[in-house]
């Protein structure tokens, strides 16, 4: 018997699916669960009803979850920070095009980051504050999800190919336990067009998870990792549960859980007993 989570409380839709697949439904506060022996095409259901549907994974123990690690740009927050910084230099289209290709996995991440940061040379550091205060928002359900994990004693972290200015501030504002990202080099109040230290790329994101697991004495099987781009695939592959959030097609294909319609708080549906 398989359990399918319909991430909405629309009884009419759930009943239609249940009747067509000889299934039964059970109502929860935020979602409906469908129990059936049939193999359902979730992609087809998602397209038909414009809702999120997921199988309840039988390979992950939600009760032993200990750590949530999320990508930042376009996953935990609504923007790609580097594209918005570039907007203040009137070069957003050029930088955004490189970002998109990097997230699709078409470009080497390290060289694409170096190229994009170089284009920001000379910008006043005050621009970073403007991006954070005027453009950056936590994606829907994000704050509720982090609070939910906190209440359950699950640690949370953000790791990003973006910049520490944003990850550190975000971690403080929404109560994340850890943050890691690239550090922009600044001289005389202006961006120098380079980053300091080694680049936080796909390998570094996966290493960050291993590092936190070691720190807390937990297994990678107890980790939930969420992302949207090719740069997140390595960390998602080592986690016990991977979540594609409003993600690129290559990421959706490889994730255990897909959320493409609702907010980050849809992850909470899996924890209901």
Image (tube, rainbow, N blue to C red):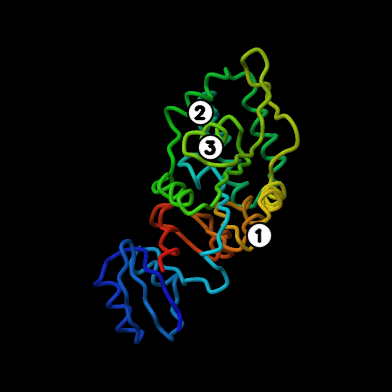
Alpha carbons under labels 3 and 1: distance apart: 22 Å
Mark 2 neighbour density, 10 Å: few (under 14) some (14–19) many (20 or more):
some
Mark in the foreground, 1 or 2: 1
Alpha carbons under labels 1 and 2: distance apart: 38 Å
Q: Look at 51% across and 64% down and name the residue there.
A: 63
In the picture provided, is 166 more to the left or to the right than 119?
left
In the picture provided, is 115 more to the left or to the right than 243?
right
Q: Quadrant of the C terminus?
A: bottom left
In the picture provided, is 18 more to the left or to the right than 243?
left
Q: Which residue is mark 3?
A: 171
Q: Which residue is mark 2?
A: 87
Dot 3 lies on which element? helix
Q: Which residue is mark 1?
A: 220
Residue toward you, 191 or 106: 191
Dot 2 lies on which element? helix
For residue 48, the mark is: none
């Amino acid at each position: 018997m398989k359990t399918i989570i319909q991430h909405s409380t629309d009884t009419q839709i759930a009943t239609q699916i249940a009747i067509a697949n000889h299934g039964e439904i059970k109502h929860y506060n935020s979602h409906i669960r469908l129990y059936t022996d049939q193999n359902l095409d979730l992609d087809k259901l998602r397209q038909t009803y414009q809702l999120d549907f997921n199988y309840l994974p039988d390979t992950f123990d939600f009760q032993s979850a200990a750590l949530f690690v999320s990508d930042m740009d376009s996953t935990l927050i609504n923007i790609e920070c580097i594209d918005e910084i570039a907007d203040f230099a009137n070069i957003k289209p050029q930088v955004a095009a490189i970002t998109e290709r990097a997230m699709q996995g078409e470009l080497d991440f390290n060289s694409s980051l170096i190229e994009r940061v170089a284009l920001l040379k000379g910008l006043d550091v005050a621009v970073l504050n403007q991006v954070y205060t005027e453009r950056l928002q936590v994606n829907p359900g994000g704050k509720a999800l982090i609070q939910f994990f906190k209440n359950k004693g699950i640690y949370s972290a953000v790791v990003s190919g973006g910049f520490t200015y944003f990850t550190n501030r975000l971690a403080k504002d929404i109560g994340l336990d850890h943050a890691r990202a690239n550090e922009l080099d600044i001289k005389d109040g202006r961006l120098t067009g380079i980053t300091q230290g080694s680049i936080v790329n796909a390998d570094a994101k996966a290493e960050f998870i291993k590092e936190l697991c070691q720190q807390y004495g937990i297994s990678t099987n107890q980790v939930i990792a969420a992302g949207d781009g090719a740069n997140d695939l390595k960390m998602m592959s080592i986690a016990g549960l991977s979540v594609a959030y409003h993600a690129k097609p290559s990421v959706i294909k490889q994730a255990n859980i897909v959320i493409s319609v609702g907010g980050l708080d849809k992850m909470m549906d899996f924890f209901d007993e």
